[in-house]
Image (spheres, rainbow, N blue to C red):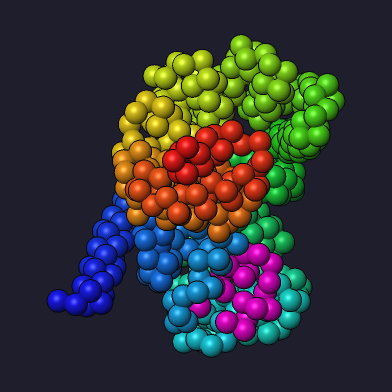
Amino acid sequence: MSFRVLLVWLVIAVAASFGQEAESHYSLGIALKKKGDLGGAKSELRRAIELNPKFNAARFYLAEILLDEEKPKEALEQLQTVPHSAAVDRLLALSYLGIGDPEQAGKVLRQHLTDAESHYYLGIALGQQGQVAAAMREFKIAVAMKPDFGPAHESLGVAFRRQGDGAAALREFQLAARWMPKNAVTLCDLGVALKEAGKLPEAEQALRSALALKPDFERARYTLGIVLRLRGETRDATQQMQLVRESHARRTSDAQSQKLVMEAREALKAGRIPEAQKALAQAALLTPANPSVYYVGGLAEEKLGNVEQAEALYNKAIALKADYAEAHLRLGILHARAKENDAALEELRIAVAADSDSAEAHYDLARLFEVLGRADESLSELQECLAIDPADTDARMLEGNLFAERRDTEHAVAAYEEVLRRKPDSAEAHNNLGLVWLNDGKMDSAQKEFRAALKLKPDYDAAQYNLNLALGK
């Protein structure tokens, strides 16, 4: 067998191996998606895409999950390279609607107007562009094609209400409620329409049903108060209105508190710690049960070097929100710095479980595994990290170091070269790549990399020492 034939055979074998591994991750991702484990499904699908960037089915299902999680921008990124089909274009259109581009959504939808859902979403796109008559036409087509299509009846009812046709709106809301009896918004719209039609007992029933599903639904509670007043039930009406006022005050306080927390974050970024702490103190007075107040407070204490106070604030944030991934992450890092490895491992694992899309959490867990000498687990977490954020050069560098320690020249070189492709001024990547070539006995390549490191960082003692080794000095 000639060298060229052997090389081609090896390339095909490696490609087949990667293809099989990608298929395995894809299959596991789909299985996890069916079980409702969306975090695990996303991790597996991302790994499949990393192994095979042209794995269109993996990108499609990942986009579907991201849309369910209301992340249309990320979904769009996955779909833009996938060949068009009716199913893909449906997700594309939803992504465009999610990022506020109804015109582009409409263009995509018009290519596949073959079912009720396509007409319905086209109606939504047209409505967002102010074309009410055209939107109504699409909604009517949708319900004609699929009479039990609740969302289309709901949207058609809203359109009729805006046109002042109360009777038609009521009819559509009744149909929508028939097919979506657990939709609080639909029940509220039905209650409002029944009130306008003078059907007060039916309106009260619909509105109470909406509030049973969504107790903080202010519009439903306010309308219920009006209905009760019209029915002469003054005491109950007054109670409902008081609840509306309390809910409104609570929402106002929440909004003000979140604004103060955002101001505190910005102040911390600029190094204005006293200003951040002042804003957080005001936020805590408005919303004492807001976990973000204590998490950002912990960040401020960390910057001041007050580790115990920071840890206490992170724990308070977690007490209010058990799955607060960022707080678990910071706690894990604090424990790791204190060499409390078991506690650090527990917190970082919780952080990853709470937010499987956090590249930072996967990276920090990988670093801890590396410190503990658990290279396989470290590499596994780095794969997750890089599947989420391929541009993370710190993760790629650590991956290269782990492969280098194993004397896995091929994968170490690939990792360091990827770092240099994304960050050409990394003297450390040149030095580490030089060490790989040095250990592999390729002195010319090693010298080239060490010199490149010293050119970028003339006082880099390690690179100078390594260059001397490569030169035989």
Residue 421 seen: yes
The answer to whether residue 465 is left or right of residue 400 is right
What predominant SS class does the magenta segment belong to?
helix
Q: Residue at x 60, y 40 (%)?
A: 215
Q: What stretch is highlighted in magenta?
A: 89-108
Q: Which residue is drawn at 61% across and 11% down?
A: 308
Magenta-drawn stretch contains 385: no
Q: Quadrant of the N terminus?
A: bottom left
As drawn, which residue projects farthest toward the left?
Answer: 1
Q: Which of 200 and 405 is in front in this view?
A: 405
Check the image and report above or below for 160 versus 441: below
Magenta-drawn stretch contains 95: yes
Image x and y of residue 255, in percent: 76, 38
Please identify the quarter of the rendering in which residue 130 is found.
Answer: bottom right
Total labels: the figure holds 0
Please identify the quarter of the rendering in which residue 292 is found.
Answer: top right
The answer to whether residue 271 is left or right of residue 10 is right
The answer to whether residue 401 is left or right of residue 27 is right
Image x and y of residue 456, in percent: 65, 47
Check the image and report above or below for 370 versus 274: below
Q: Residue at x 56, y 67 (%)?
A: 76
Image x and y of residue 321, in percent: 55, 28
Check the image and report above or below for 92 versus 430: below
Image x and y of residue 422, in percent: 58, 56
Check the image and report above or below for 110 versus 41: below
Q: Which residue is drawn at 51% across and 42% down?
A: 467
Q: Nearer the viewer, residue 449 or 165?
A: 449
As drawn, which residue projects farthest toward the front?
Answer: 473
Q: Nearer the viewer, residue 283 or 56?
A: 56
Q: Which of 464 and 143 is in front in this view?
A: 464
